[in-house]
Image (tube, rainbow, N blue to C red):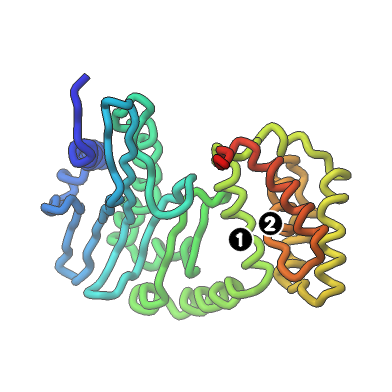
Amino acid sequence: MEQKRPADIFQELLDYLWNGLGLEEKGWRRLKKGDFKKKMKNGLTYQIWFDRSRYNYIDYEIGHGNVEVGFSCIIRQGDDYLYSFRIESPTGGSFFRMLTEDLRLDIELLDTFLPLIKAHYLDFIDRFEADPVEALQPVCAPFTEAEDYSWRIHVDEQMVERYGTAEQLAEYRHQAELHGTPEHKAKNGMGSMLFHLSHAKDVDQAWASSRTKEELDQVVEPFVQAKRQTGQWTQEDEAGYQLYRQETDPEKRTFRVWYLIANPRGLPKEFVQKELEFRFKLFANRPKEKV
C-alpha cells in the first residue's frame, strides 16, 4: 500500500471536488493554498475555501490516522459575505474526517457533498446570475436549514438589500425577528442536536429507539416541575418541552429528553444523579475513562 501524507490526501480531495463539480468548465480557478475561486466583473466573488486541522496525521505502522478538512461555499462582495452554504459535520465542529479505516480518502463521503454543493451553491449562482430576485425568493431569511439540519444556508441582509425587492427585504426582516423567538431557538437547538446524536458513534441508538413514552415521561416530568418551582424554566424550555410532547419518533423523543434534562444546574443532587444515569445509558458506547 502506497504511504501518503495528510497533504497528499488533501490534494486528492481537492482534485476530486474540482473535477466532480466541473469548476474548470465554469471558469473557476484554483488558488495555491487550495481554494476554488471565480471573480466576476460585477464585483462578486464566488469562493470555496478549505481549512485543515493542525492535528492531521497518518501512522502506517500502527494503522491509524486522522485527516480532518473543513470547507465553506461563499459569495462575497469586497469584504461583505453575502451568501454562504455549509454542510454540517456529523461529529460537530467545522471539520470532516476524510480517512477510511484503511487510511484512504473517503470517496463515499465526498460523493455525498457533490450534489449538495451543486444544488445549494452552484445552481443558486446560476439562478442568481439569470434573475437575482427569483433566486433569492426561497432564501429570504438569515438562515435556511435542511429538514434534518445536515446543511445550512446563511444570507446576509445586505444581499437582499442590494439584489432583492422591498417585499423580499420585509420578509427577510420578519424572518430575522422570528429567528430570535424562544420557539425558533428551541426548534433549531433541538434540531441540530438530533442530527448530531443520530450520527454519534458513542450513542446507544438501540437503547434510545426502544424507550417508551411512559418511561421518558417519568424521566423528564420531575425535571420540568423542579425547574418551574425554582424559577429556572424559560420560554425556550417550554417550547422545547412542547416539541418533546409532539414527537412521535421514539429515538428522537429520547434525544429531546436529553436536551431538556442535560446539565441540571441549581437543582437538588438527586436530579444530578438522574441526569448521570440517563447520560451513561444514552452514551453507553463512549470509551470508559481509565482509572
Determine which quarter of the picture holds residue 215: top right
Point out which mark residue 189 bears.
Answer: 1
Q: Is residue 114 above or below residue 191?
A: above
**Residue 41 image position (x, y, % from top left):** 14, 68
The residue to which callout 2 is attached is: 259
Q: Is residue 117 left or right of residue 92?
A: left
| Circles 2 and 1: CB atoms closer than 8 Å | yes
**Residue 67 image position (x, y, % from top left):** 31, 41
**Is 180 or 224 nearer to us in this picture?**
224
Q: Secondary structure at mark 2?
A: helix
Q: Is residue 285 above or below residue 178?
A: above
**Residue 121 image position (x, y, % from top left):** 35, 53
Determine which quarter of the picture holds residue 283: top right
**Residue at left offset 68%, top offset 61%:** 263
Give the label, 2 or 1, closer to the camera: 2
Is residue 253 at least partly visible in the picture?
A: no
**What amino acid does circle 2 point to?**
Tyr
